[in-house]
Amino acid sequence: MPRDPQTFSVGEGHDPSEHGWSLKTPIYETATFVFESAEAGKRYFEVVYQGAPLEPGERLPYAYSRLDSPNLRVVESRLARWEETDDALVFNSGMAAIYTVFISLLNPGDLVLHSTPMYGATADILRNLMGRFGVISKSFGPGTTVEEIKQLIGGDRLAMIYVETPANPTVDIFDIELTSSVAAGRGAITVVDNTFLSPVLQRPARHGADVVVHSATKYLGGHNDLTAGVVCGRQDLIDLLRHDRYRIGTTAQPSTASMLGRSIETLQMRVERQTTTATQLAGFLNDHPKVAAVNHLSLLAPDDPSYETYKKQCLGPGAMIALEVAGGEGAAFRFLNALKVVRLAVSLGGTESLAMHPWSTSHAQIPPEENTANGVTPGLIRFSVGVEAVEDLIHDLARALDQV
Ligand SMILES: *Cc1c(COP(=O)(O)O)cnc(C)c1O
């Protein structure tokens, strides 16, 4: 039996004899599937909608593409291997995945503790959309101690701790083991957004996470050509989420699932290459006089409070860099406008290097005081390193910094 997730990435879940002996899984662009008999249709609904357990050896067929498709099952089995979880589900965007986790696993009056800073849309859904349904949310910053987290919970009914690590856009990290021990002690679950490092460099389930979410638009998709989301986790939780995905239809399309599956085959090679390049670029930026500060996990010093957490839970520094250009928004804009190889765009994790300005875009709805307290300042640039040659990227950065 192959044991490495990279090996599973090119074969798991696909049996050529079931697909006309095609090496690759064909894309099942169909809205509906034909039931073998009326009894098979009845049985499908018993299992899927009424929760009847499958008999030993019984395989669930397909019925309708909002519910399930062969392309989804192939990629889901490979993702579960990468994240070392029981099972996985693919959604039509990262936010569809995250929203389904919240709507499925939270009830009115529940408390969610979340790390901050975090992806703007996740904070917005928690505070505003879930807030409308009576969910209470509170946040904690990097370096918060167990005692402080317990104080924050107070007498509320904790249902979930949601940790985005490394955080978007500052690349600050949080200790998954610490938060999951607090959550488990109160019968709550821990959800980790693993978008920034991907399972190549961080496997949150090893450190106690019950659920792992991804914007698969980023490293998992990896080519800036699709939007998708992923949830991996414990079987009982995935079963609940699958049922709600059936109901609300946040399911990925068959063509998206197929493209995502192809991307997973090269995930490890891309992430490794991007990480090596980013480590070289972080060193270059760190030495540059026009750069006030650089955050990349390769630069963490042993006396940094995050160093132990990094050593414990990350398998490498990844390819996301946060840099502070001296001179605030004006300098940041001059730098961004001068870049030629690196494109000015939101999103991250793909083959193209991309840079953006969180203060005026993704984090613009967040109150300025909160942004500043979280390290999201007017001079901050989020930089996602792609697969271009490192010399060309250094040249591009050096030339753009000259214009600041
Ligand atoms: C992009 C992103 C999301 C949202 O995912 P979409 O695919 O854009 O819906 C969530 N979390 C993080 C950390 C992200 O970077």
Image (cartoon, rainbow, N blue to C red):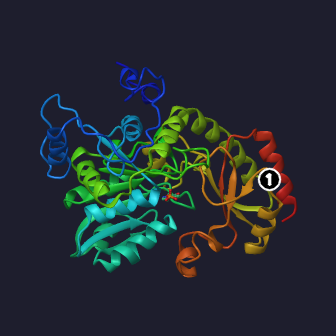
Is residue 297 shown left or right of residue 33?
right
Residue at disc 1, secondary structure: helix
Q: Quadrant of residue 361?
A: bottom right
Q: Nearer the viewer, residue 73 or 342?
A: 73
Location of residue 332 by image quarter: bottom right
**Relative to 279, is 376 above or below?**
below
Q: At x 26% / y 61%, what residue is drawn?
A: 105
Left or right: residue 162 compared with residue 328: left
Crowd class of label 1 (few under 14; some 14 to 19; many from 20; radius 10 Å)? many
Q: Which residue is mark 1?
A: 397
Q: Is residue 372 left or right of residue 82?
A: right
Q: Residue at x 51, y 68 (%)?
A: 120
Give the percent coordinates (x, y) of residue 19.
Answer: 40, 26
What residue is shown at x 37% (from left), y 37% (from top)? Answer: 70
* Residue drawn where x is 40% and y is 56% of the image: 97
Residue 176 in picture, x, y percent from top left: 37, 52
Q: Quadrant of the N terminus?
A: top left
Name the quarter where the C terminus is drawn.
Answer: bottom right
- Residue flagged by tag 1: what amino acid is it? Leu
- The verdict on label 1 being within 8 Å of ligand 1 is no
Residue 112 seen from this side: yes
Residue 320, given in percent of the width and then of the height, sits at 60, 51
Q: Nearer the viewer, residue 66 or 397?
A: 66
Number of numbered labels in the structure image: 1
Q: Position of residue 240 (x, y in %)?
A: 23, 53
For residue 311, say whether it is visible: no
Picture layout, residue 169 above or below residue 396:
below
